[in-house]
Image: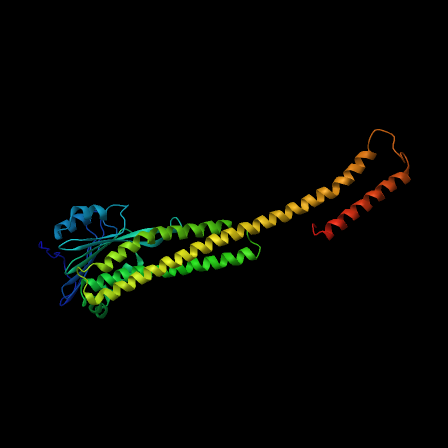
Amino acid sequence: MPSLPKPRLRRTTRGRSAVATRPPEDDTPSVEIVEFDGLRWINIERPRQSDRGWLEEHFDFHPLDYEDVFSRNQRPKVDEYPEYLFVVLHFAAFDKNVGRLNAAELDIFVGPDYVITLPNEPLAPVEYLFERARSREDFREQLFSKGAGYLLYKIVDDCVDASFPMLRKIGNKLEHLEEDIFEGRSKEVVKDISNTKQEIINFRKIVRPQRAALGDLERTKRYIPEDLDIYFDDINDASERIWDMLENFKEVSEGLESTNESVLSHQLNDILRVLTAVSVVLLPLTLVASIFGMNTRVPGEQSIVGFWVVIGSMVVLLGGMIYAFRRRGWL
């Protein structure tokens, strides 16, 4: 096993626990460290080349792992090495700039006395957990005292659980869309249905490859004691629940889209039925008016009585056709 020297950073407290931070300057590694009883949690948000240099100086990781950390298209996976464990996971994160869900990558190195997290985008669960470990000594002791495997579990578990509030929001959107459809706002919800379906598709693209990686993480035995198997099994159960909910949302969104199209089609059919009935009703009247408007001599020509006879005949014909159409349910 290669020697893994500890970072020579200034400690802010003495004793069994310590916290160290470097400012995120352009040429300075943005490394945050929380330490307790020999176990270090090193968090590097949005790693840059200066951070890679810091890692290469203090740890002996494989060059391909560094390429994976700085790659934008890395799939979720778990790689086991004799000296450490390398984990790549993706989690859904809402991007306010574009207004939709995107995949945030979290790279994790796990060793006998350290856990290194490298999120390529800010992940609220990781930030919240790290801040609690930084600011509360009792929580830091509880989190670090069970080893690197338990710390890894808490980080992954919190990130997985953060998906459920997002799923509840999607579920609420689908409920509101259903209400809008049956309240006569079908035209207005077409775009909303499309946006919600896109969110579900993006979520599924993130979760689908993640399931295999979480299964591999449950089966690995490096730095994860047997008594923690049940914890990682719980993460897998949560991941499966997320996938089942996404499958259900997919079916519901497709059903709502189909229902909305049926409602719009029904409304269009009603409009076409009325217009067709009006055209058919006016057709005989147009025929009568055309006959008596020809440039030939017709009965009652130049007679006021003949005019009223023609008008009366047209009114009777109009009333009869409307009555017949209404009895058949066409109007």
- Residue 280 visible in the current orientation: yes
> Residue 327 versus residue 306: which sits nearer the camera?
327
Q: Position of residue 13 (x, y in %)?
A: 16, 65
Residue name at image x 76 percent, y 50 percent: 323
Residue name at image x 80 percent, y 37 percent: 289
User: Looking at this rendering, what residue extends furthest in the front direction?
Assistant: 328
Residue 220 located left or right of residue 293? left
User: Looking at this rendering, what residue extends furthest in the top direction?
Assistant: 295
> Residue 175 versus residue 117: which sits nearer the camera?
175
Say which quadrant the N terminus sits in: bottom left
Quarter of the view holding residue 277: top right
Coloring basis for residues: rainbow
Residue 225 located left or right of residue 243? left
Q: Position of residue 265 (x, y in %)?
A: 58, 48
Q: Position of residue 7 (x, y in %)?
A: 13, 56
Q: Position of residue 132 (x, y in %)?
A: 26, 65
- Residue 187 visible in the current orientation: no
User: Total marks drawn?
Assistant: 0
Residue 148 located left or right of residue 252? left
Residue 218 located left or right of residue 206? left
